[in-house]
Structures are given as structure tokens and as C-alpha cells.
Amino acid sequence: MKILSKKITLYIIMIMLIAASVYFAVYMRAVADYKKAVRDTTFENVDISMVPDGVYVGEYDVDFIYVKVEVTIEDGEIAGIDLLEHKNGRGEPAEIVTDRIIEEQKIDVDGVSGATNSSIVIKKAVESALRNKPGS
């Protein structure tokens, strides 16, 4: 009986190691895809003065970071940006990027060191909002 019990234990350990290896490989692939998505993110120039007054909603998702914003335009300027959702890991410091966008009245502002990826995703969500129709 002890030999059978040892074999079963060994099989269980082997199955657990294989499952852990598969999980790790899938996770590492997801991380690589996320990093590539951030690296490949580009910004298009948005002439804010040409955006009609209104409230615009936009989002951007690169799996490990997701941002949804609400951007208010008044008199051809960004009057406010509300961060509706920010799934970020350690990127919370990047949330000050919205203040920088309002201050500089442009999307492609300097990001936050240590929260570069979240900074990029927040800026892209703002761009996405300004390319949408008000209220969408």
C-alpha cells in the first residue's frame, strides 16, 4: 500500500509541476503581448480647439492596464478629465497625467517615471475619447 501511495503522490506532484509550467508559460506570453501593445501605442494629433463642446468617453485596454475616461470640452479647451476606471497594477501615480493634459492642452504630455505604461494608456484613452462623439 505504501508503494502505491508513493506512486500516486509522485504522479500528483508531476501533474502539479506540469500545470504550473503551463500557467507560467501562458502568463509570460500575456506579459510579452501587453508590453508589445504598450510599445506599439502611437498618438495622433488631435486639434482640441476643433472638438465641439461636450462630454466624451474613451477607453484603452492593453490587458494588464485598462483606462476609461470622461473628457469635458468647453470653448475649445479640455476643461476636465475624469478617470472613470484605471486597472493599473502599480501605475496609480500616472493618474496625474490627466492634470498635465489639462494644463498643457495637449494629449502627448510627459509621462510619470515608474508608471510609464499607465501614463501611455491614460493618454491614449483621452485621445480615444476626443475621437468619439459626445456622450459615446
Image (cartoon, grey):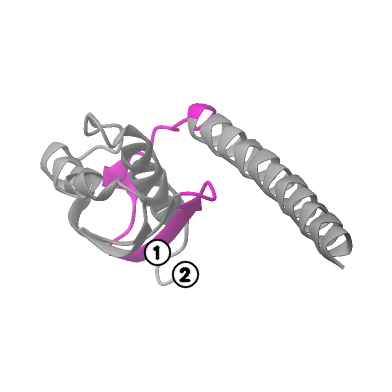
User: Mark 2 — residue?
Assistant: 136
Q: Circles 2 and 1: CB distance less than 8 Å?
A: yes
Q: Which mark is residue 57?
A: 1
In the rendered image, residue 59, in percent from the top left (x then y), is placed at 45, 57
Q: What is the count of numbered marks?
A: 2
Q: Is residue 45 magenta?
A: yes
Badge 2 amino acid: Ser
Q: Nearer the viewer, residue 103 or 116?
A: 116
Question: Residue 113 falls in which quadrant of the image?
Answer: top left
Residue at 40% x, 44% y: name it: 121
Mark 2: which secondary structure? loop
Q: Quadrant of the N terminus?
A: bottom right
In the rendering, at what x and y percent does residue 18 appear? 77, 46
Q: Which is nearer the eye, 43 or 14?
A: 14
Is 29 above or below relative to 88?
Answer: above
Residue 73 lies in the magenta-colored region = no
Q: Secondary structure at mark 1?
A: strand
The magenta region covers 39-64
Q: Earlier in the sequence, mark 2 or mark 1?
A: 1
